[in-house]
Image: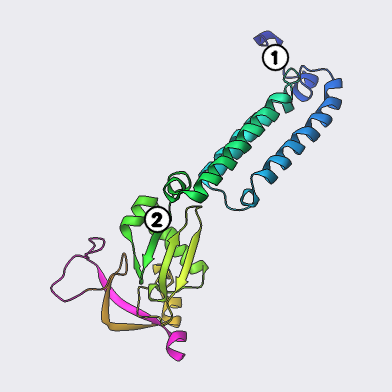
């Protein structure tokens, strides 16, 4: 460890090169090539999912692999063999977990997690959103990304185990809660027709069964607004 008096701001060689000999930079080229090869082989052996959406196990494996291979890349006193051993162990664990998960659904749900239903028949599933920590804004943003303008067009919105969303549209859209931001009412009026015969919870889109109901039975809110239809759907 360097002493305080040894640290000088005008010592450009120490700042740029460090305390290692210049010959180590030639060795870095070889180390980098080997580390890159280890990474590529490891990713290839762990499967195609490593280049797409990662599960928790795969993220942990990638983080562990990155931490392992980074040490010999920067430290001249550390060899490459430990990184190879760690890569072999990680690959073995991943292959073993994948093999067991393919045969045991319970083990798969424990290691890979399960999917959750965020929207069911045009209504936000508040319990599932709390469980998965998916906010209302995030769910509605995902629907808008898919071209949805109101919840009546949604049959199911699943939050998959890998962290992605899967949308299933309803064959015949029903009146639903508008998901256009409140500050953009002008655009909502352009594409929607309001159906005052149907009242929905402004928070989750659940319908009001009768006039005696005050609080939404799905989320507990007490603000009811008219449902909307998409004008394009009405023209079909």
Q: Which mark is residue 54?
A: none
Depth check: 156 or 11 in front? Answer: 156
Tag 1 or tag 2, which sits nearer the N-term?
1
Please tell me whether mark 1 sits on a helix, a strand or a loop.
Answer: loop
Which residue in the structure is indicated by mark 1? 7
Depth check: 91 or 221 in front? Answer: 91
Mark 2, mark 1: which one is toward the viewer? 2
Please tell me whether mark 2 sits on a helix, a strand or a loop.
Answer: loop
* Residue 7 in view, yes or no: yes
Depth check: 176 or 68 in front? Answer: 68
Rendering coords of residue 46 (x, y %) = 64, 44
Crowding near pointer 1: few (<14 within 10 Å), some, many (20+)?
A: few
Crowding near pointer 2: few (<14 within 10 Å), some, many (20+)?
A: few
Q: Which mark is residue 135?
A: 2
User: In this view, which residue lies farthest toward the bottom?
Assistant: 235
Could you give the CA–CA distance between mark 2 and mark 1, rounded to whole angstroms?
49 Å
In the image, is residue 170 above or below residue 12? Answer: below
Quadrant of residue 208 in the image? bottom left
Rendering coords of residue 215 (x, y %) = 19, 65
Q: Is residue 29 left or right of residue 224?
A: right
In the image, is residue 22 above or below residue 145? Answer: above
Residue 115 lies in magenta, yes or no? no
Rendering coords of residue 88 (x, y %) = 66, 33
Quadrant of residue 24 in the image? top right
Q: How many marks?
A: 2
- Residue range corresponding to the magenta coloring: 209-236
């Amino acid at each position: 460890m360097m002493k305080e008096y040894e640290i000088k701001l005008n010592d450009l060689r120490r700042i740029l090169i460090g305390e290692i000999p210049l010959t180590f930079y030639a060795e870095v080229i070889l180390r980098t090539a080997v580390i890159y090869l280890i990474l590529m082989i490891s990713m290839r052996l762990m499967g195609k999912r490593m280049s797409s959406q990662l599960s928790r196990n795969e993220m942990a494996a990638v983080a562990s692999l990155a931490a392992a291979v980074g040490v010999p890349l920067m430290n001249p006193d550390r060899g490459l063999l430990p990184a190879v051993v760690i890569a072999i162990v990680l690959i073995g664990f991943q292959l073993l977990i994948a093999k067991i998960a393919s045969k045991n659904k319970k083990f798969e749900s424990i290691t890979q997690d399960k999917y959750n239903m965020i929207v069911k028949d045009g209504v936000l599933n508040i319990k599932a959103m709390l469980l998965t920590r998916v906010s209302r804004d995030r769910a509605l943003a995902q629907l808008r990304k898919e071209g949805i303008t109101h919840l009546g067009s949604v049959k199911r919105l699943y939050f998959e185990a890998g962290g992605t969303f899967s949308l299933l549209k309803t064959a015949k859209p029903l009146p639903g809660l508008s998901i256009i931001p409140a500050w953009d009412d002008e655009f909502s009026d352009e594409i929607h027709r309001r159906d005052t015969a149907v009242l929905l919870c402004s928070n989750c889109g659940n319908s009001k069964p009768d006039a005696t109901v005050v609080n939404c039975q799905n989320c507990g809110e007490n603000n009811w607004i008219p449902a909307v239809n998409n004008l394009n759907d009405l023209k079909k």
